[in-house]
Image (cartoon, rainbow, N blue to C red):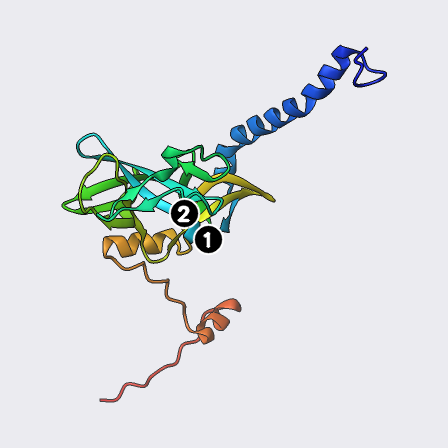
């Protein structure tokens, strides 16, 4: 018998203690397996976020590459990042135990693209590209040559210990992915505009014009039986 739980044997008490953990693990595994299908079915929603609690950063890798990460300030102190005098960002969270204070989103498991209420995680890839001193966060897909610029920054200098703060372009913001009433540990780079509109703007082309609609009088005549009566204009020499 387990003395702390009268009426239960030790093995029964262990099984009862283990059951909530097992259920939580099964629920997490089920959600992970559901994710690709949920994206395709459009079942993921999003919720707005306080932009002041987040920093979109580029971390230097090697001699010329960059890695995208997002930091979240959960509690006011200590600060998870600080701006340096040279314009770069100091990732201060690396100097203390930031559990419960800061959160990190490091790769496509932590962030993706959402445009016009569509989850595009499986179609679009986010990557950083530098041209001269300008660094751009770009979204691209193999099915379309047009690249969408999500954020950009000027690189004051390259320092392996200093990150570059990216500023989101107009119309873009950070949102949190949700499934039903459950908020998930996943961020969206989101834009409310329809995808064709963003592609047209990025490529410098206009959207296709809507199809021409016949005048209502002709539509009304076309709904009846027999030929459509057209006005006759007499010919004069």
For the point 80% across and 19% down, the residue is: 5
For the point 16% across and 47% down, the residue is: 133
* SS of the residue under disc 1: loop
Q: Nearer the viewer, residue 96 or 32?
A: 96
The Cα–Cα distance between marks 2 and 1, rounded to whole angstroms, is 8 Å
For the point 56% across and 26% down, the residue is: 29
Question: Which quadrant of the rendered structure holds the N terminus?
Answer: top right
**Residue 165 x/y as whole percent:** 29, 47
Query: In this figure, which residue is indicated by the disc labeled 2?
Result: 54
Q: In this view, does 171 lie above or below 92?
A: below
Q: Which of 46 and 203 is in front in this view?
A: 46
Question: Which residue appears farthest toward the right when viewing the image?
Answer: 7
**Residue 97 x/y as whole percent:** 44, 32
**Residue 186 x/y as whole percent:** 47, 39
Position of 79 compared to 89: left or right?
right
Q: Residues within 10 Å of mark 2 (few under 14, many from 20)?
A: some
Residue 90 badge: none
Q: Nearer the viewer, residue 100 or 235?
A: 100
Position of 119 compared to 124: left or right?
right
Question: Which residue appears farthest toward the left when viewing the image?
Answer: 132
Q: Do the residues labelled 2 and 1 touch (CB within 8 Å)?
A: yes
Q: Residues within 10 Å of mark 1 (few under 14, many from 20)?
A: few
* SS of the residue under disc 2: strand
For the point 27% across and 46% down, the residue is: 84
Residue 50 badge: 1
Q: Is residue 151 above or below residue 127?
A: below
């Amino acid at each position: 018998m387990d003395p702390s739980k009268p009426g239960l044997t030790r093995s029964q008490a262990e099984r009862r203690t283990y059951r909530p953990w097992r259920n939580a693990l099964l629920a997490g595994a089920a959600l992970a397996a559901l994710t690709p299908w949920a994206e395709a079915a459009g079942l993921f929603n999003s919720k707005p976020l306080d932009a002041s609690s987040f920093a979109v950063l580029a971390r230097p890798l090697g001699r010329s590459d960059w890695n995208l990460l997002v930091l979240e300030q959960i509690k006011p102190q200590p600060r998870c990042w600080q701006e340096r005098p040279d314009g770069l960002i100091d990732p201060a969270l690396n100097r203390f135990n930031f559990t419960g204070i800061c959160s990190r989103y490091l790769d496509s498991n932590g962030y993706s693209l959402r445009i016009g209420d569509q989850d595009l995680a499986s179609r679009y890839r986010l990557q950083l590209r530098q041209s001269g001193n300008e660094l751009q966060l770009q979204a691209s897909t193999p099915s379309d040559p047009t690249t969408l610029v999500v954020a950009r920054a000027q690189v004051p200098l390259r320092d392996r210990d200093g990150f570059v703060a990216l500023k989101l372009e107009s119309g873009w913001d950070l949102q949190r992915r949700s499934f039903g009433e459950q908020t998930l540990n996943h961020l969206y780079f989101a834009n409310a505009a329809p995808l064709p509109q963003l592609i047209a703007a990025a490529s410098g082309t206009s959207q296709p014009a809507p199809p021409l609609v016949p005048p209502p009088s002709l539509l009304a005549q076309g709904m009846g039986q027999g030929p459509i009566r057209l006005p006759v204009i007499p010919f004069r020499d």
